[in-house]
Amino acid sequence: EHRWDSREHMVRESRQDRELGACPRESLSLHSRFTTLTITREPQSKHGAKDGAVGTSQGCTSASSGAATTTTMLFEPSGDGQTPQVVVLVGAPGMGKTMMVRKVMVEWGEGALHTQFDFVFCIDCKAIILPMEASIANLVSQCCPGLQVPAGKILDDQKKILFIFDGFEALGFSLVHPEAELSSDPREVKPLELTLMSLLKKTLLPKASLLITIRPTALGSLRQCLKGENYVEILGFSAARREEYFHRYFENPNKADAAFRFVRGNEILYSLCVIPIMSWTICTILEQELCGKKNLLECSKTTTGMMMFYLSQLLKHRDRDNPQVLQQFLLQLCSLAAEGIWKHKVLFEEKEIKDCGLDLPGLLPYFLNQRIPREGEDHESVYAFTHLHLQEFFAAMFYVLEDDGETISSLGRLEKDVNKLLESYNKSRKDLNVIVQFLFGLVSQKSIEYMDKTMGCRISSRAREELLEWLQRRHRGLSHPGQALKVSEMDTFHFLFEMNEKSFAQSALGHFTDLDLQDTRLTLYDQMALSFCIQHWAGLGSVTLQGCSFHWRDPEAELDVSVPWVWWAGGQPGQVRCAEPLLSVLSRRLQWCRLSESCCAELAALLAEHPGLAQLELADSSLGDSGVRLLCEGLRTPGCRLRILR
């Protein structure tokens, strides 16, 4: 009876939506929302590193290298048969530590899991106000004020107790005190830091179990206090779990499919969805975009827009009283990110972090993970951005972020030259593609206004002219003298789509007449970028997509290897309408067809639906007599305005 009373109280507490990024929609049950995370385990300290070192994913989180875990695995026996008494759950902000704790609480409260514990006491270190001095019995009473059993009596059976400290770093304790000052009496009142140290070092309730969640940057002091601990690092969502999360988030399976298909076609967003809070951010945005729509073909949010929204949510309640500290931190963070990109560097030494003034415990963990060296390693702690694309985003911000009206310099070491960045990308540094894409997105008028309004960051618009001149100069150089000026690089359409400004696209494409892509695999995101640009390309006279294929679902799925339409080779019949985002804006002339007889019914229907099409070239096609008859039916329809058929 007493055990259930405690459980009931704990479950009630655990259902409060306190985690970062709590969904503003109607509250869903934890069971329906929770998606299994991928973790990696470190051995108990006695088997490997005395200091309990935990490695981060070093910049680009890869959830494929760990194992999927449920909360049952946290206290499972290790390889030597020992059941861990202390589990340290490590993860950057937004990786799902608090959600994992809530899952433990609910499952225990329902009697489904962790039944070896009669009492579970969960302390949210980020939210609870703790006394300056307390005994462990005092903490139990404060944690569960409705208990009908005296706290002292509960603590007598240590093996049946689990203490959970969620967000341990929020306590801010150094945990450096002589062992002689520690307590062994659960009723003894001492300074709170000493009481907790006693619990961690097992001088107090040595048989009780502990579950501690903490950020990688705060592990340094904690690891010195623990004995026999197991370290578990959250790596995020595996590929399969990302799709599962989308289906759990959206109540409507059609919307879930549409949202995931949109993200799967965007390599940057799909990669970022390994981070649970980023998956939540993207789903939140796409849910709003899908209101009243059947698809996301005209999504108003760019990749940059989603990154800015993520950043604003991450910093929503940070240093609100001292915005200058946040501004200076972001300036130096962008500087570090850019220098790292130029040097192909994703790991940064502790000295670099301090030299840049980034060693602020209230901000640093939101952007950088810390890797503490194992025993025998002769280097200091190193840091990495929580994801490579985040480093690239901040590197792009470095080029356009202003301070007091003047664009900042990077500690005098890195030249802030947009043209140098663009020319390096053009010539040899194709790894700068994502940075250039973010650069276009950041200097859009919407981005400039959003960053200023939500974070007080001033984005310089001076780079816009440099970006425009570079695009025009770039494609003129690729066209031969005497030939029509053509655009033949897909990334150009990505850059213009990222900026998402009609006037800029018109200016960038105004001097060109031809679109010519060869042997290109086009995702749904590529099609949307092309559609946007073609709509605002007044001088476009010819579209050539030779040997191209359209992919609109999972790029790895066998059935989506190639989706044909009028001007490219191969593929499976009956899927012509998959190219609809592009078809709706194409006009005038389509060429380079290699169509089979089975495609002609769809082609005939499209001739009627797209009256702007004036010229059609069916080179190298095998239509057959029945195919030609179907084509003629399309030509007879009133909606067909075709003038030339070759």
Image (cartoon, rainbow, N blue to C red):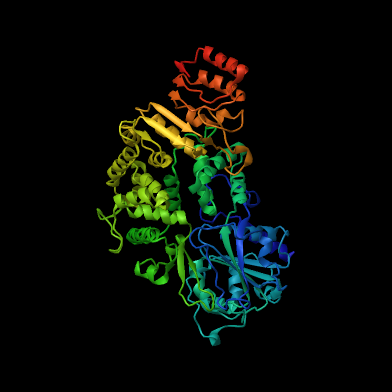
Q: Residue furthest right?
A: 1
Q: In this picture, is 185 found above or below 578? A: below
Residue 137 higher or lower than 110, as above or below: below
State which quadrant residue 331 falls in. bottom left
Quadrant of the image occupied by residue 552: top right
Q: Nearer the viewer, residue 287 or 40?
A: 40
Q: Quarter of the image for the N terminus: give it.
A: bottom right
Above or below: residue 26 compared with residue 381: above
Residue depicted at x 31% and y 32%: 511
Q: Residue at x 61, y 23 (%)?
A: 597
Q: Position of residue 470 (x, y in %)?
A: 31, 43
In percent of the image, x 38 and y 48: which residue is there?
436
Residue furthest to the left in view is: 405
Give the camera-side residue of 23 and 487: 487
User: Residue 533: which quarter of the image?
Assistant: top left
Which x, y percent locates residue 204? 62, 80
